Amino acid sequence: MEPFGVGCSKWRNYASCSKRRAILLALALDALGEPPARFHPVIYMGNYLKWARKNWRGLTPGQQLTEGAAGWALGAGLATGAGYAASGLPWYAQGVLLKPLLARKALFDAVGAVATALERDDLPEARRLLSWHLCSRDTSELSAAEVAGAAIESLAENLSDSVVAPLLAYRVGGLGLAAAYRLTNTADAMWGYRTPELEWAGKAAAHADDLLNLAPARLTALCTLLASGGKGWRVWAHDRRNTSSPNAGHPMAAFAGALDVKLDKRGVYVLNAAGSEPDAAEVRRALALAWRAFGVGVLVLILPVKLP
């Protein structure tokens, strides 16, 4: 009898049982935390992206766009090649290699730390933790409700970006696509800003990240709505396009509706305007919802369904 895959031979024309085993192993390893930095592929991806940025010389928008696109394409190509080179390894080796490409425990722990600081009424520490672990915006002037809201937004968005997306990429395209996704998502996080230096250079990575996250963001929203018993679908349907990102609004609006909280990024967007102001207790509720949505997502991703 085969672990994780009774009747695997029955599904020989479907996505392989080895992928489902690898996904479960990667999630089990993730519960132990992150590997040391010297063994972490995302650290190497980040170092490559920093090197590429240091070597940009373009002065015009066209030159900057070309350099940024070339830097992203080279990095994505190297990541894809490395992933596909490892695709012939046994499922347990693939599970070990898949683990660093996702970060469920790190995300949930970071959000929990913000909730703990808010529960202690330590707003400066909550702001620091939010800025350090979860978002790039200036948090120094955020109110407690805004910090709680930003933590919930980051939890929802990164449940898609850091958990569902790499797992879905692996299920569809193996380690090659999962590695390409992680490189692209990291490039968007480092380059995808509307600043004079990055406005054009980061466009290719940002658009590639948008494309790769189309399915994961919507799957995450669906899992969230299923995990909440359908509560919040009206808010999701109404507010999912309120953000500038074509993807982030989906899981965030689903969380806002399911929790019935107002998520307000000052001067940028509001999700579920009629909801209550979030606080530490709502961050805890968001974590509980994220656990349920995560569970639904894992079940979906390991189902023996035929993939294109």
Image (spheres, rainbow, N blue to C red):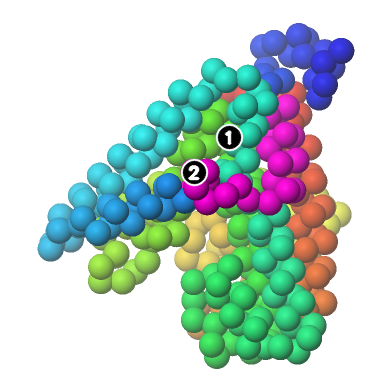
Query: What's the residue at 65%, 32% (across, down)?
Result: 95
Q: Amino acid at mark 1?
A: Leu
Q: Amino acid at mark 2?
A: Pro
Q: Earlier in the sequence, mark 1 or mark 2?
A: 2
Q: Whole-percent x and y of residue 185? A: 47, 51
Mark number for residue 41? 2
Q: Which residue is mark 1?
A: 97
Q: Quadrant of the N terminus?
A: top right
Position of 289 with respect to 135 (left or right) is right
Work out whether residue 236 can be spotted: no
Count of marks, rendered view = 2
Q: Whole-percent x and y of residue 289? A: 80, 60
Q: Are marks 1 and 2 in contact (CB under 8 Å)?
A: yes
Query: What's the residue at 74%, 83% (across, down)?
Result: 118
In front: 275, or 80? 80
Position of 184 relative to 247 (above/below): above
How crowded is the residue under tag 2: few (<14 C-alpha within 10 Å), some, or many (20+)?
some
In front: 99, or 218? 99
Query: What's the residue at 50%, 57% (across, down)?
Result: 246
Query: What's the residue at 33%, 46% (across, down)?
Result: 72
In front: 94, or 150? 94
Position of 186 with respect to 88 (left or right) is left
Name which quarter of the figure residue 285 lies in.
bottom right
Q: Whole-percent x and y of residue 152? A: 68, 69
Magenta-tinted stretch? 20-42
